Image (cartoon, rainbow, N blue to C red):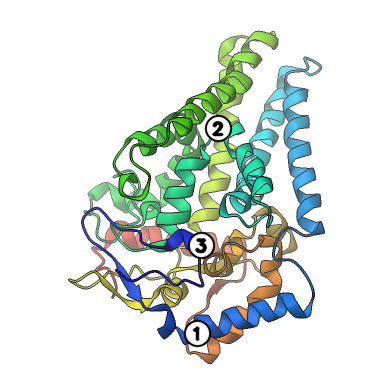
Amino acid sequence: MHKVSSKGTNESKNTRHPSQKIRFGKPQEDQYYSELTRRVNRYFKDNNISKGANREMILKTILILGVFVASYVLIISNLFSPWVLIPLAMINGFFTALIGLNIAHDAIHGAYSSNDKVNRGLAAVFNIIGANDYTWRISHNLIHHTFTNIPDHDSDIDQIPVIRLNPKQKLWKIHRFQYIYTFFFYSLTSLSWVFIKDYALFFGSKITRHKQNPSPAKEIFRLFGYKLIYYTLFLIIPVIIIPLPWYYILLGFLLLHIVEGLTLALIFQLAHIVEGTDFPVPDQDGTMEYSWAVHQMYTTADFARKNPLANFLFGGLNFQIEHHLFPKICHTHYKNLAPIVKATAKEYNLPYIEHDTFFGAIRSHIKVLKRLGTVQMPAMN
């Protein structure tokens, strides 16, 4: 099996699907990525800057963590009426999502700092907010970044059966309405994550071929230990401290996750399930038409690149093309790398898929949901 572009991400090497090996073009054949990498490296050298976190990223980290902690402290302080606690819970949910999008995402990719201890330390925050960095590193860094939009291989497009994001998935009658009800399920994303998904991934078969099997004992301890910490912080302590009925606390907890889940799901889906992106399939031998890097250009999209608020909030995931090509570069650099990536793609006659606005990307996502819900689409080669 060929290694996926050695200049890309080490996370993308030597992975396989349980039923079929996937092969991309040899790295040395990818002239586009070689030239692009040279230009990107020159940008950092000419400007004498690090590929890791810059001042903007550090200030953003302080702000996001500060609001997250402050909102939590205010919730359990008993200083406010029940009607104030609800918006505080929603604010906490939004900033929990921002921790995942901005801080943990970069840290788990090893993009926050050249110091592994810093990356590991910040990645641990992912566990404090209820997720698990071990399963995410495998399902996202390894599987999704390697098999992007490949039906039956990319776990991100293999959702629950009532959501059809995979064009090879069986088409049901109910799917014609998925452009309406899917957003409800999106709002449950983080709730499922903290109670179901991590356990299912850790002990299930979806990521078995990509992880050390059996999982290291310390990872089992970390999984249950951090989950217990999260349940204690966000359920047990509020029920004990806040002088309100338990069902009111549960309501606040649910609203927190609705905001968090909808934020996370939308940002991730707008990068791959929009007009213009393909769902390529391998041939009978498991060989993809393009090299890994070129494959990313056909399956990934940017959105709202010129929106300062989106650039600040979305953790660089609105620069998804740049992120997939250079996952070990801190996301605050992507806005400056995007013109280089776009110009190089044009020179090599490759697509550069983008939507000018956030809401334009949402409209495009809805159109694809409609199409996937009504048409038995053949996966594209």
Q: Residues within 10 Å of mark 3 (few under 14, many from 20)?
A: many
Q: Please, which residue is most extreme toward the left here?
A: 284
Q: Can residue 148 be spotted in the picture? A: no
- Which residue is found at the position 41% from the left and 85% from the top? 29
Q: Nearer the viewer, mark 2 or mark 1?
A: 1
Q: Can residue 29 be spotted in the picture? A: yes
Report which residue position mark 2 lands on.
Answer: 130
Q: Quadrant of the C terminus?
A: bottom left
Q: Label for residue 32?
A: 1
Q: Residues within 10 Å of mark 2 (few under 14, many from 20)?
A: many
Q: CA distance from mark 1 to mark 3?
A: 21 Å
Q: Amino acid at mark 2?
A: Gly
Asked which secondary structure carries label 3, the reply is loop
Rendered position, 377 above or below 291: above
Residue 15, x across and y down, in percent: 35, 59
Report which residue position mark 3 lands on.
Answer: 271
Mark before the other along the chain sequence, 2 or 3? 2
Q: Amino acid at mark 3?
A: Ala
Rendered position, 299 above or below 246: below
- Which residue is found at the position 71% from the left and 23% from the top? 85
